[in-house]
Amino acid sequence: MSTIVFLHAHPDDETSQTAGMMALASRDGHRVVTVFATDGDHGERPEHLGPDGDLVEYRRGEARAAAAVLGVARIDWLGYRDSGMTGWEQNDDPLCLHRADVDDAAARVARICDREDADVLVGYDHHGNYGHPDHIAVHRIARRAVELAARRPRLLEATTNRDAQLAMLDSPEAAEFMQALASGGMDLDVDRIRQAILTGDDGQPIGVAESEITWAVDLPADVIDLKRRAMQCHASQTSDIGMMLAFPPDIYAVAFGTEYLIEPEVGGAGTDAPMRRGWPFG
């Protein structure tokens, strides 16, 4: 059995990007460790917490609850502040992840990998999936961390399949998908969503082309249910998590039923290796 360390930018990112793989890995007997680079201090504040409640500790509690659903053995926190979206004033906070020294942050991750004798480290693709400064930082930190670890872990990078996202907008399920978005409070049309996919948070496309992806992990129905339950643990984040949870089960399964990984040393951009559907942690 292996030890797999998942490095995520914020508490709740794990549930939308890698929760299915985390649950499957734990079920198979692997040790799953989650590392959150930031404390989520710029997240949404639930009303019942009031203006003086400890949002960071509240979100840590949500992360612990989600970890219990997924079978995560341990959570670690790097302690950086949330950098906010591209262009926000928080980008300039000297304590935020966006401003962190990559070698320093990577050394912290490498120490966790060494403590766990990690076999695998999962980070993000080069664009952090959608251009968020903290997600891009996670990509750089993970790549450096595997170089600094005493025993180099296998590097995998979580991503999304841009081709599949665009194809879904032209599918028979598109109308139901749009209705689900509307019920979640998002007043969007197909053209605006397509444009959002192509421009991301920083003007660059979300995810990567299928030709750049190494692994597609199709989740069984019961694991999709676990993923949704884990997402519900982060219910305080109503803008993103609330919108996702508004999807009816069939649309949720289409949107979140497959998770994607790039394995830089095996396949992806610049190679002829096709995307393979299967389980990368055999």
Image: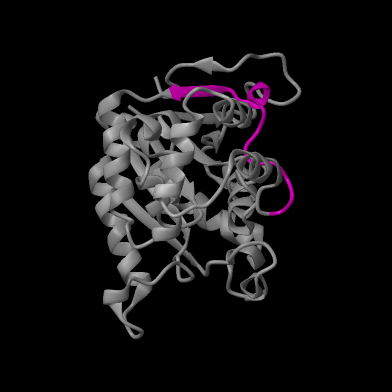
Specify the quadrant that holds the C terminus.
top left
* In this picture, residue 242 sits left or right of residue 222: right
Q: How many marks?
A: 0
Residue 225 on image: x %, y %: 27, 35
Q: Can residue 274 be seen? A: yes
Relative depth, front residue between 65 and 117? 65
- What's the magenta bit mostly, secondary-structure-wise? loop
Instruction: Give the quarter of the image for residue 54.
Output: bottom left
Instruction: Give the quarter of the image for residue 117.
Output: top left
Q: Can residue 29 be seen? A: no
* In this picture, residue 252 sits left or right of residue 65: right
* Image colouring: one colour
Residue 177 on image: x %, y %: 46, 36
* In this picture, residue 150 sits left or right of residue 183: right
Residue 53 on image: x %, y %: 31, 80
Residue 255 on image: x %, y %: 45, 33
Point out the residue furthest to the bottom here: 52
Q: Please, is residue 67 above or below residue 276 in the view? A: below
Asked if the magenta segment contains residue 90, the reply would be no
Asked if the magenta segment contains residue 206, the reply would be yes
In this picture, which residue range is highlighted in magenta?
202-217
Q: Residue at x 31, y 75 (%)?
A: 47
Q: Residue at x 31, y 41 (%)?
A: 228
Specify the quadrant that holds the N terminus.
top left
Relative depth, front residue between 216 and 100? 216
